[in-house]
Amino acid sequence: MAPWEQELATLAEHRGRALVGYAYVLCGDQRHAEDLVQDALVKVFSRLRRREGADGGRGVHPLDDGGTTEAYVRRAILTLYLDEYRRRRRWTGVKHLVATDDHARGPESGATARADVAAALDRLAPRERACVVLRYFEDLTVPQIAEALGLAQGTVKRYLADATATLRTVLQVPHWTTTDGRAAR
């Protein structure tokens, strides 16, 4: 078994669920998330296979520049998600994703907080959603997000501010409360 095959098997076995979870937060659909992960794995590991054939099996690893393979796969997931959005936008125009219900939450609604957040994330534009995911789910700083997406820091801040305003409106969180629901002092 080639070294890249062992690395692929280990990554898929130990970190596969985390990668699908990351992709799900981006796209909001389980099957689409699984497809994104599979496409990203193929994209990253096909480089290893091509390189192995080109160097005669000498073991040159194209990812040996200090990063981890999982980080490359996560970056490939994000890139594939954004590229897909751009293609769809080019051919069919922008479709606004809307939550299914605009009713007030109450004890009788069966929706959990997680489902509410997923529906609220669906209302964001892809770049806003990517910024929110990288900021609040990946714990990246604004400069790190700007570098990862190839944007200016001010643009990232604007996307985060717009996304926060949209999420507040959709989730019906007053602007004077903290993220855990307590009143700000």
Image (cartoon, rainbow, N blue to C red):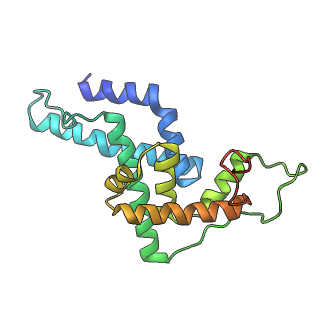
* 181 with respect to 152 (left or right): right
Q: Is residue 93 above or below residue 80?
A: below
The furthest residue to the front: 185
Instruction: Please give the name of the residue rendered at 35% of the width and 49% of the height, measured from the top-left corner.
Output: 144
* 75 with respect to 36 (left or right): left
Instruction: Please give the name of the residue rendered at 30% of the width and 42% of the height, measured from the top-left corner.
Output: 44
Q: Residue 63 versus residue 170: which sits nearer the camera?
A: 170
* 52 with respect to 88 (left or right): left
**Quadrant in the picture for the N terminus:** top left
Q: Residue 56 versus residue 78: which sits nearer the camera?
A: 78
In the image, residue 25 lies at what x, y percent?
A: 55, 48
Quarter of the image where one finds residue 42: top left
Does any portion of residue 76 appear in the rendered image?
yes
In the image, residue 32 lies at what x, y percent?
A: 53, 51
Does any portion of residue 41 appear in the rendered image?
no
Q: Residue 6 versus residue 75: which sits nearer the camera?
A: 75
In the image, residue 175 lies at what x, y percent?
A: 68, 60
In the image, residue 165 lies at what x, y percent?
A: 61, 64
- How many marks on residues? 0
Q: Is residue 68 above or below residue 146?
A: above
